[in-house]
Amino acid sequence: MTVPAEKQGDWHRPFAAGASDPGSARAGFSLSGPATLPKKIAVIGSTGNIGVNCLDVVDHLPGRLKIVGISGHANNALLVEQAQRHRPEWVAVTHPDAAARLDRSLLPPGCELLVGADALTRRVGDRSAAIDLVVSAIVGAAGLESTWAALEAGRDVAVANKETLVMAGPLVMDLARRTGARVLPVDSEHSALFQLLQEPGALHRVERLVLTGSGGPFRGRTVAQLRDVTIAEALTHPTWRMGRKITIDSATLMNKALELIEARWLFDMPVSKLDAIIHPESVVHSFVEFVDGSVVAQASPPDMRLPIQYAMTWPDRVSGPTRRLDWKNLSRWTFEQPDRVAFPALDLGLQVAAAGGTAGAVFNAANEVAVERFLGGQLAFLEISQLVSAVLLAHSHDLRPGLDDLKRIDQWARLEARRWQNK
């Protein structure tokens, strides 16, 4: 892949529609809190790790947050349990076969069952639906359609699905700007940056955004030591408890590469101002270095419920279920530079962020297939990054794709990744 000059553009900032700073408010929101409580939340992907944590936060803030809709792919048992506890207006099952197996009598009275991804997309895109915020927590490229529909309807979206911004960051942020929607980050690193940039005009005074990462289970290993990594080893994360795909991404540092691409579009920040550092304790979640040399950090225990809660209650801060730092027993926090030879995904991600266009969609699709193949025993651990790099090099780069172009290149990249053999 030949990386062109980085595309510049006046893309929508995530803080406030039609405004350059987070101090501006629009209908339904003010700096003193939402105009109407409880805030009505739809959680897309409620049976995954982020979705489960999201509902746990709602459990602890019943007067402030209310679940009006949830969706899952095929985990009917958990979806029904969630529906019985939160009594939403609707439940969506995106896998048609799973929907056919669901016993509708187990849903609460008056709860509507939506079948298929298209039905879910139509509901979150229905301007008449009573939804204040959509939490996009579907893993992978599948989250783009519902996120797009919600933003097109002018709804705020809390994005836990980083692939949406990796694939279509410029298009998504421009859509939000045009419709008056906000894109609120849920990833702990991007939530940290979002919190650190709340001061009016802060984005214009940034020298560098630095995302932290735990380093995964293989921090400190050399290339030679990574050749015989097993699936079980790669799925054992030292800090976070996450789904299988994101855990493998953390082991390869592909997750940090995806987050750098996401930050590039979410904060409209050139790649020259983005970096990453390894922080194994996972307490400091990101740094902002300002032009005067000041560096500000956000720190909290590694608990995803905090960034989830902040996205759902923003601009307020309220007491919730998250863990607190134990100030009496703090000892030391360590930082180190990532090994870019053993973990080439990091620099590959920065190249993709600089290239823009179709590069992000190819990068994401190839990585999703590479992780599937690794977990299926078809690839070695080191071959994950090799596959992604090879598919990127093979694709015809388009600097200004439309949404349909991105969908086509996504499918092409998946086919290429499934055919790839290490030569």
Image (cartoon, helix red, strand yellow):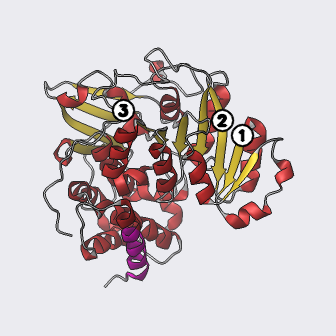
Q: Main secondary structure of the magenta part?
A: helix
Residue sitting at 79 percent across and 63 percent down? 101
Residue sitting at 39 percent across and 64 percent down? 404
**Disc on res. 67:** 2
Task: Give the spatial CA distance, label 3 vs label 2.
Answer: 24 Å
Q: Secondary structure at mark 3?
A: loop
Position of 414 with respect to 77 (left or right) is left
Q: Earlier in the sequence, mark 3 or mark 2?
A: 3
> Compared to 324, does 167 lie above or below?
below
Location of the C terminus (image quadrant): bottom left
Location of the N terminus (image quadrant): bottom left
**Disc on res. 17:** 3
Q: Kindly identify the amino acid type of the residue bearing the numbered disc 2.
A: Ile
Q: Is residue 405 magenta?
A: no
Task: Give the spatial CA distance, label 1 vs label 2.
Answer: 8 Å
Magenta stretch? Answer: 408-420
Q: Kindly identify the amino acid type of the residue bearing the numbered disc 3.
A: Ala
Q: Position of residue 55 (x, y in %)?
A: 64, 37
Task: Give the spatial CA distance, label 3 vs label 1.
Answer: 28 Å
Q: Position of residue 20 (x, y in %)?
A: 27, 29
Q: Kindly identify the amino acid type of the residue bearing the numbered disc 1.
A: Glu
Front: mark 3 or 2: 3
Q: Position of residue 195 (x, y in %)?
A: 37, 27
> Compared to 328, does 134 lie above or below?
below
**Disc on res. 89:** 1
For label 3, the crowd category at 10 Å Cα-Cα, with few meaning under 14, some 14 to 19 and many 20 or more, is: many
- As rendered, which of 41 and 309 lies closer to the eye? 41
**Disc on res. 362:** none
Position of 147 with respect to 288 (left or right) is right
